Image (spheres, grey):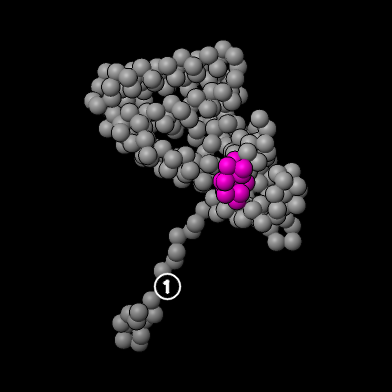
Amino acid sequence: MAPTEGLHAARARGRNTRQLVHELLRSRIISLELAPGASLSENDLAAELGVSRTPVRESLILLGEEGLVDVYPQLGTFVARIRERDIAAAQFIREALECAALRDAVGRATRRDVADLRELLAAQADTERRDDPEGFFRLDEEFHARLMAAGGHPEAWPVVSQAKAQLDRARRLSLPLTQQLSLLIGQHTAVVDQLEQGDLDRADEALRSHLRLVFTDVQTIRAEHPELFAEPEAPVRPRREPRRRVDRAGAGEG
């Protein structure tokens, strides 16, 4: 089913149009169907989706608040280029929540939890054999959500998912890298092995190492596709303290 067909079917079931348009455009941006720097026209999007301009305009505002869209007066609206500071912020949130959930999972995960995770590992290996990075990405999401559920925190995954939009764009760009799927599956396997053995420290170390791989990938991707990234921001200079004035008696004045 085409995305627009799904949108119209969901509208027919009574779902809010603005929410649906927002979800669809967000998905297109994160999947890189709408590439960083691409121009976005309210009129064109409304015509394509078969909706009025209002839900499109409201959706673009929401996407701007998420850092996925940039609006330049007199120039137009564009898909935001990837910002490394946003990747770092998303990574911080993701690592904090996922590692906290993993620590709860060690010692309490059931055989069913471990079996489900290993089924996902087998499915991921199949996507590698088929050279299907998009299929792997979906299973990767499912794996991390299932891992949080094993720790008793399934409700925290939507929070992680919402926070890591910028991170997901970088992750999708990294998947075509040589041996990337094999490496990621190996890291997933190490996490599950340590979880099953009840080794808290090694499980935590394996997951943190896995989640931080994106920082290395970003440098490689930026070197190959600099046009997809925003220019680095100038570092914040330390604020200078005002010089103290000295009166004739030599006493300092505030």
220 or 81: which is nearer to us? 81
Query: Majority secondary structure of the magenta segment?
Result: helix
**Which corner quadrant of the image does residue 254 belong to?**
bottom left
Give the residue drawn at x 53%, y 20%: 181
> In the shown orientation, is residue 154 left or right of residue 68?
left
Estimate how packed mark 1 is, as few (under 14), some (14 to 19) or many (20 or more) residues with alpha carbons within 10 Å: few
Give the residue drawn at x 52%, y 53%: 235
Give the residue drawn at x 61%, y 44%: 11
Q: Which residues are magenta?
A: 10-22
Where is 33 relative to 85, above or below? above
Give the residue drawn at x 41%, y 69%: 241
* Residue 14 lies in the magenta stretch: yes
Where is 181 relative to 223, above or below? above
Where is residue 22? Give x, y as percent. 59, 47
**How many numbered marks, from 0 up?**
1
Residue farthest toward the front in the current orientation of the protein:
13
Amino acid type for the residue under numbered disc 1: Pro
